[in-house]
Image (cartoon, helix red, strand yellow):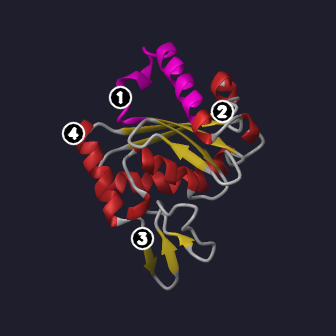
Amino acid sequence: MAHPLLLLVFIHNDLSDYDREKIYNDHFKWLGKELETLSGRGVAIVLIEPSKAPRLCDHGYKLGTPEQALYSWHEKIERYKDDYSNDAFATYNDHTRKFLLLTRDNLSDTVAGIASHKGYFAIASINSTQTPAHEVGHMFGALHEDFEVYHNGWWDETIMASGSIESSLRRNAKRFSDKNRENIRQHLAEYA
């Protein structure tokens, strides 16, 4: 049986006034179902409050470039993994366990999120319901160029539309394109 997937979502301090249930329903509930559908695996999405991980949830994601913010987030995640190497999360590996910092604001004027492609760490703002899913997609091997637009009574774009292509006139399809579903399945087959 394939190993389940775990997404640890660290809620940044700047979102501490947001309703946790609303964050989950708007950004992650549908994503979990999509990942389960395409992978055939169980998916656990754990939202971690700032009080439970203060060293992570205060990350200075707007300092320097988005790439610098991602690199320093990676360093914090490595320390976190070392500190909690014997807990229940340790049964996962870096291919089935992902770490996402969820923020109120974009990382810069032009970057809403950033991820390590086929890696295990990312940062995403809540500027749209699609941004966190988009960055999670990158961690599982999805690509911008494999996004699609569907017409189902209205135009819907799949998760991996980049900010330069994304249109406010199209809805979120709340799914990966068929090609990106295959990209994710291939990535998971390589490692788990």
Circle number at residue 49: 2
**Residue 98's spot in the image, x, y percent?**
45, 36
Question: Does the residue at mark 1 contact the one at mark 3 (Cβ under 8 Å)?
Answer: no
Q: Identify the amino acid type marked 2.
A: Glu
Which region of the structure is painted magenta? 70-97
Disc 3 designates what residue?
Answer: 148
**Element at label 2:** loop
Question: Any magenta on residue 95?
Answer: yes
Residue 180 appears left or right of 46: left
Secondary structure, mark 3, is: loop
Residue placed at 43% from the left, 55% from the top?
A: 33
Q: Residue at x 50, y 54 (%)?
A: 134
What SS does tag 4 mark? loop
Look at discs 4 and 1 and give the one toward the viewer: 1
Q: Nearer the viewer, residue 152 or 64?
A: 64
The residue indicated by pointer 1 is 93
How far apart are the two marked residues, 1 and 3, measured between alpha carbons?
30 Å
- Mark 4: few, some, or many residues within 10 Å (few <14, many ≥20)? few
In the depicted structure, whether residue 166 falls above or below residue 70: below
- Location of residue 1 (image quadrant): top left
Q: Earlier in the sequence, mark 1 or mark 3?
A: 1
Amino acid bearing label 4: Met
The type of residue carrying mark 3 is Glu
Dot 1, crowdedness within 10 Å: few (<14), some or many (≥20)?
some
Going from N to C along the chain, the mark reached first, 4 or 1, is 4
Please tell me whether mark 1 sits on a helix, a strand or a loop.
loop
- Note whether residue 133 is visible: yes
Q: Nearer the viewer, residue 24 or 95?
A: 95
| Earlier sequence position, callout 3 versus callout 4 | 4
Query: Which residue is more in the foreground, 169 or 164?
Result: 164
